[in-house]
Amino acid sequence: MFFTFVSLLFSGLMQALISPPLGWVALHPVSWVPALRVFSRLSGRRALLAGWTVGFCANLAIFYWLPGTISRFGGLSKPVALLVWSAFAAGTGFYTALFAWGLGRIRKVAGPRWPLAVAAWFCALEFLNPQLFGYLQGVAWYQIPHVFLASAVTGVSGISFLVILCNAVVLQGLKAVRGSDRALRRAWLGNVAVFAGLVTLALCYSGVRSDAIAAAERKAAPLRIALIQPDHTIERRRAMSAMQPDTFAKDLLALSGQAAAKVADNARIDVYVWPEGALRVDPGQDRNRAVLDFVRQSGAEIWTGANHNTTDSRNELVSHNSAFRIFGDGQIDTRYDKNILVPFGEYVPLRDVIPGFDRIESVGHFAAGTTIPVYTSGTTRFVFLICYEAIRSGFVRKALDDSVNLIVNVTIDAWYGDASEQSQHLMLAATQSAMNGIPLVRSTTTGISAFVDARGVITSQAGNFTREALVGEVRPVHVPGFYSRWGDWFAWLCVAASALLLIAASRSNA
């Protein structure tokens, strides 16, 4: 019993070490072996409990920053925040319980090729599991483009498949090597060959895709961008709100001036990107007059987050979490309003339906936008994605038509404290670049601001909770792949295959 619990705990907690900021992906190919060994010996409720233990431990460890965030962002007490954290870990980890429950059935009906079936079963459940953060196993490989660029065909689910397949093949190999069953050894060698073939395909495709992106980058006109990270913590933002109305604008302009001083005398910054909520009101209002003066003098554009307030037909206040593009002559382009709002932070869901929800305090009561405008700046065509919109794969694909060649992500990650969330959030945003073949620039209030190329590789990044201006060149390109066109086809294929295997298993037991 003790060894069983340690095995489950090991596999669960190992996921936090594989996750950023540590990113120990070298452990990933064997991290699930202890848990798989336990799962394969159990059935029924015992298997469910074992799987749930792994999922619960993994999500507790990966998302250890949630209680502090819930308290700061949602205004809940610490005991309630701890309860919500535990409930989150228990709920999102339940798919591993279903995985463990079904593993024996899948393994039995799949025969010698069970590692392939088990990998498909895992990916099916991982994909179907409702996740606010979209943390799939394969995302941890996002900075290894030699393999991860295969996600441009299969999505992240394809990388998850390889990870679980490797673990299953290792487990099968442990038994095959120790035993004298020649049939088992032949089956294992066959699965090793299949795994090696899939990895080879991933490597070859990734190489070809990287070359295609490089060719597109050579043709693209460079854009020099300054990412402004003002280190406006939540406490500092609140203090600044009580100061002069133009305090936010002046502080951002001071840091932008420092960025301008970094470039060579014969060069200039084309665009300054300011983070989510950088300005408390529309750029065109009097308190932000210095912002418009700055762009007129420099000729550079500013792409910034800002709050937008208006009134509806009943003369009631309506707020939007917005982003604005300011032209070099001071004119202001079409406003983008955030489409996907954070529950209990930007709005309270079902507040008019569930008793007591109307008394829950949140950071703001915002209305969601319904459109995703595409902005044109020379040969650059970009879209704004605010905060965690940039990690929602389906929404990102919806936003990227064929003409778009740059993603601009503005966010506030100060709510999470100095934790691993910032690295995880950046990881999930960067995967969108790899899957869709499009670069991303990311400006945050406290970190981590970054430049990400069309391979999903972070080419430059700021620190966490630092005040700095990050200047770099971007080559806007769009090299769509199979995933861009067809979405999560591989994940749905895993779902269909798993359903067929479970049906076959139920009939064999009938």
Image (tube, rainbow, N blue to C red):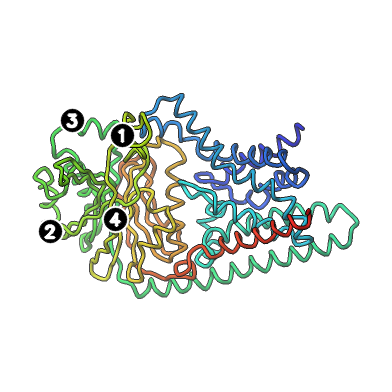
**Inter-mark Cα distance, 4 to 3:** 32 Å
Tell me what residue is drawn at x 54 percent, y 61 percent: 148
Tag 1–tag 4 contact (CB < 8 Å) = no
How many other residues sit within 10 Å of disc 2, few (<14), some (14-19) or many (≥20)?
Answer: some
**Inter-mark Cα distance, 4 to 2:** 23 Å
Q: Is 135 situated left or right of 475 in this image?
A: right
**Inter-mark Cα distance, 3 to 1:** 13 Å
Rendered position, 405 above or below 341:
below
Tell me what residue is drawn at x 17 percent, y 40 percent: 316
Look at mark 3 in the image and give the residue it sits on: 242
Name the amino acid, label 1. Answer: Ile
Element under disc 3: loop
Q: Is 386 situated left or right of 168 in this image?
A: left
Tag 3–tag 2 contact (CB < 8 Å) = no
Element under disc 2: loop
Tell me what residue is drawn at x 43 percent, y 58 percent: 394
Quadrant in the picture for residue 94? top right
Element under disc 1: helix
Rendered position, 498 above or below 463:
below
Tag 1–tag 2 contact (CB < 8 Å) = no
Q: Earlier in the sequence, mark 4 or mark 3?
A: 3
Residue 458 in the image: state x and y as whole percent.
43, 56
In this rendering, the label closer to the viewer, 1 or 4: 4
How many other residues sit within 10 Å of disc 3, few (<14), some (14-19) or many (≥20)?
Answer: few
Rendered position, 114 above or below 61:
below
Residue 390 in the image: state x and y as whole percent.
39, 54
Look at mark 1 in the image and give the residue it sits on: 234
Look at mark 2 in the image and give the residue it sits on: 331
Q: Earlier in the sequence, mark 1 or mark 4?
A: 1
Q: Earlier in the sequence, mark 4 or mark 2?
A: 2
How many other residues sit within 10 Å of disc 4, few (<14), some (14-19) or many (≥20)?
Answer: few
Look at mark 4 in the image and give the residue it sits on: 370
